[in-house]
Amino acid sequence: MQKAGVRWVLSILFLFLAVATAAWIFREWRHSKEHRFDPLIREVARQHGLPPSLVKAVIWRESGFNATALGGVGELGLMQVTEGAAQEWADARRDRQFQAVHLTHPGTNLHAGCHYLAKVTRRYLRTDRPYAYALADYNAGRGNVLRWMHHGGETNAALFLQGMTFPGTRDYVQSILQRSQQYERDFRP
């Protein structure tokens, strides 16, 4: 009976160690996945005048750090950039060689996505929280943002978010702004 008890204890100990090891491996994998683009995010975001933590939070929400992600309506890459937005960036650079497939390259995707996000942010600089409005524009389009700005939400982000008729966009904006705060520590000088 003692041998059976010892085997049982050893089996439980082995199982515990296997689970703990698997959990550690998963945490390390997730950590490396979330941080592998940090130097590139820092560089490109700053070139476009955006906080790196915000850009990283957009990537987290849009693609889960998958550089080859394909969205439901053709968005590509880390920031899930549409071909139209990317072409606008390429035209601004006078890049005649640009093709949508280039959006699967992390650097190209970040430049195109940050270019677009910076552009839409400039639309809302007179508001109390321009990034809330810009993220809504990035997700749901300018027409919807203009509609939601009525009824007191022209410059007040809290009223703007309350007036949204798309709960998914409200969640999108709030989750990115919250995650952005968490990512600030990743980009401290």
Image: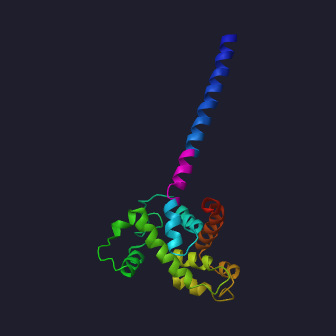
User: What residue is shown at x 56% (from left), y 44% (from top)?
Assistant: 26
Residue nearest the viewer, comparing 169 with 18: 18
User: What residue is shown at x 51% (from left), y 52% (from top)?
Assistant: 33
- Residue at the far front: name it: 189
Residue nearest the viewer, comparing 41 with 84: 41
Visual colour scheme = rainbow
Residue 34 inside the magenta-drawn segment:
yes
Residue 5, position in %: x, y? 69, 16
User: What residue is shown at x 53% (from left), y 65% (from top)?
Assistant: 42
Residue 143, position in %: x, y? 52, 85
Q: Quadrant of the C terminus?
A: bottom right
Residue nearest the viewer, comparing 108 with 72: 108
Residue nearest the viewer, comparing 11 with 107: 107
User: In this rendering, would 94 be left or right of 64?
Assistant: left
Residue 165, position in %: x, y? 61, 79
As drawn, 142 above or below 187 = below
User: In this rendering, would 67 be left or right of 20?
Assistant: left
As drawn, 12 above or below 97 = above
Q: Quadrant of residue 76?
A: bottom left
- Residue at the far left: name it: 97
- Tell me which secondary structure the magenta stretch mostly adopts: helix
Is residue 186 in view from this perspective?
yes
Is residue 1 in view from this perspective?
no
- In magenta, the rendered stretch is 28-38
Q: Quadrant of the N terminus?
A: top right
User: What residue is shown at x 54% (from left), y 79% (from top)?
Assistant: 137
User: In this rendering, would 172 be left or right of 101?
Assistant: right
Residue 85, position in %: x, y? 42, 77
As drawn, 43 above or below 65 = below
Q: Tally the numbered discs.
A: 0
User: In this rendering, would 105 be left or right of 158?
Assistant: left
